[in-house]
Amino acid sequence: MAVISVRVSDEEKKAMLNFAKFHGESLSQLLRNVFFERLEDEYDIRVATEYENQKSHISHSWEDVRKELDVD
């Protein structure tokens, strides 16, 4: 298993350790989880953006929708 070293201030380290303890995780687990959650979020945003850019946008007026649904 690889080891990664990260430089942080003493105050940052204390905050990270407290946050990890609050969530019942080791600092290594916390950092790993946060990294992969962020990676997944950014991937999801990219996929959604690409989808929105590629799909054809069809819009309907409120009047057309009301007529279609027979709503007054």
Image (cartoon, rainbow, N blue to C red):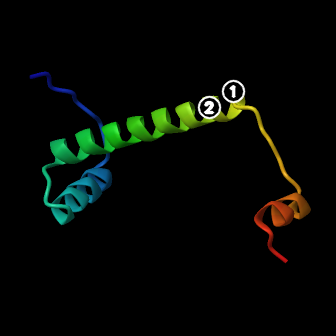
Residue in the picture at 70% in, 30% down? 53
Residue in the picture at 47% in, 32% down? 43
Q: Nearer the viewer, residue 18 or 39?
A: 39
Q: Check disc 2 and report the residue beneath it.
A: 51
State left or right for residue 47 relative to residue 65. left
Quarter of the image with the C terminus is bottom right
Rate crowding at label 2 as few (under 14), some (14 to 19) or many (20 or more) other CA atoms within 10 Å: few
- Picture quadrant of residue 21: bottom left
| Location of residue 12 with respect to 69 vertically, above or below | above
Q: Are marks 2 and 1 in contact (CB under 8 Å)?
A: yes
Q: Check disc 1 and report the residue beneath it.
A: 54
Rate crowding at label 1 as few (under 14), some (14 to 19) or many (20 or more) other CA atoms within 10 Å: few
Q: Secondary structure at mark 2?
A: helix
Residue in the picture at 30% in, 56% down? 11
Residue 10: percent from left, percent from top: 27, 51
Q: Amino acid at mark 2?
A: Tyr
- Picture quadrant of residue 7: top left
Looking at this view, name the residue that lies furthest to the bottom.
72
Q: Which label was assigned to residue 41?
A: none
State left or right for residue 46 relative to residue 24. right
State left or right for residue 62 relative to residue 18. right
Q: Nearer the viewer, residue 44 or 57?
A: 57
Residue 45: percent from left, percent from top: 54, 38
- Picture quadrant of residue 51: top right
| Location of residue 46 with respect to 8 vertically, above or below | above
Q: Amino acid at mark 1?
A: Gln
